[in-house]
Amino acid sequence: MSADKLTWSDVHEIAFRLFEAEPDLDPLTLRFTDLRQKIISLEGFTSDPKDSNEGILEAIQMAWIDERED
């Protein structure tokens, strides 16, 4: 992964950045549509928003939960 570009496959980096941006937000309270919007709004995110799916969003959500627990 490039230091300044994020794609849907960068699950753990996306989760880390979401956690840094909103450390008090419980990712389980987000609808996937809201989670997707937060992801595509991240600086450096370059993937096509249409390429997301429930599996990718769930993986990012779970990784974000892991970040909160560490």
Image (spheres, helix red, strand yellow):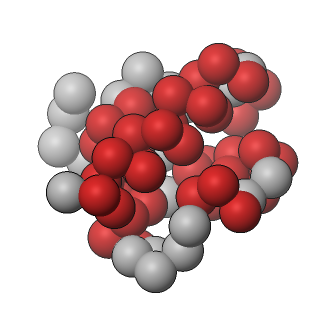
Question: Measuring 19% from the left and 57% from the top, which residue is drawn there?
Answer: 70
Residue 3's spot in the image, x, y percent?
A: 17, 43
Residue 11's spot in the image, x, y percent?
A: 40, 32
Most extreme residue toward the front is: 69
Most extreme residue toward the bottom is: 24
From this view, report whether residue 3 is shown above or below residue 1: below
Quadrant where the N terminus sits is top left
Question: Measuring 31% from the left and 37% from the top, which residue is drawn there?
Answer: 12
From this view, report whether residue 21 is shown above or below residue 14: below
Left or right side of 45 for 2: left
Q: Give the mark count.
A: 0
From this view, report whether residue 58 is shown above or below residue 67: above
In depth, the one of 24 and 49 nearer the eye is: 24
Q: Is residue 5 visible?
A: no
Residue 23's spot in the image, x, y percent?
A: 39, 76
Question: Measuring 73% from the left and 59% from the top, which residue is drawn there?
Answer: 30
Q: Is residue 1 visible?
A: yes
Left or right side of 50 for 13: left
Residue 10's spot in the image, x, y percent?
A: 36, 30
